[in-house]
Amino acid sequence: MIDASALAAKPVLEGGRIRLLPLTERHADAFHAAFQDPETRRLTGTHRDWSRAELGAWIATCAERTDRLDLAIEDRETGAYLGDLALSRIDRDNAHGSFRIALVPGATGRGLGPEAIRLLLDHAFDHVGLHRVQLEVFTYNERARRAYEACGFVVEGRLREALYWDGARHDVLLMAALRPAR
């Protein structure tokens, strides 16, 4: 059974090196800057060029949303913004939702992504009550696929040539993690 209050109450989740906390206006400049980076745009498949004002307006709605959870990833020691992640598209009847994550340039390759993913999955399974969390990853993002697999995601399907990027068509892998038996 889904606990809707777990989506409405925006948690702070503490890891060894990172903290996940509600995405707020104080993250907007760093969030916007991250999506100006060409590699971040390629890895996330972001075609749209969001203005700072548009992102700020969207972030302002995050705290009030009861249908999704948007969290910033911060360094526990410095408070530096490292990226964001979201749990969205919640299907209450079937107890599943979708997941995405984006790290800023310089935060990748340090194990921070898997730490953030595990924190969010624990929250999704143990507090929200989801049974299944799914995501999409582009076939050219091998590093992300390996991180997802290390966190329990399994490839379930392939959307052939679903992304058009930089003059070429790319496949998208559908992956999911299931609530561990306890």
Image (cartoon, rainbow, N blue to C red):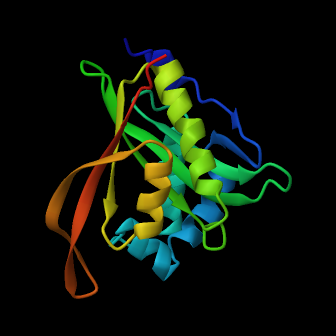
Front in this rendered view, residue 36 or 173 = 173
Residue 50 at least partly seen: no
Residue 119 placement: quadrant: top right
Q: Position of residue 155 (x, y in %)?
A: 29, 50
Residue 111 percent coordinates (x, y): 64, 58
> Residue sitting at 64 percent across and 65 percent down?
30
Residue under the point 39% across and 30% down: 67
Image vertical order of residue 81 relative to residue 65, above or below: below
Residue 20, how many percent across, how many down?
Answer: 65, 42
Is 111 or 31 nearer to us in this picture?
A: 111
> Who's the residue at 44% across and 42% down the image?
152
Residue 105 is situated, as x and y percent measured from the top left of the image, at 61, 73
Image height of 127 relative to 142, above or below = above
Please name whichever residue, 155 or 167, is drawn nearer the observer in this view of the structure: 155
Front residue of 90/125: it is 125
Q: Quadrant of residue 181?
A: top left
Furthest toward the left, the residue is 160
Rendered-image quadrant of the N terminus: top left
**Does the image show residue 8?**
yes
Residue most toward the bottom? 167
Residue at image position (64%, 64%) is 29
Q: Please, is residue 17 above or below residue 124 in the view?
A: below
Q: Is residue 17 left or right of residue 48?
A: right
* In the depicted structure, whether residue 68 falls above or below residue 34: above
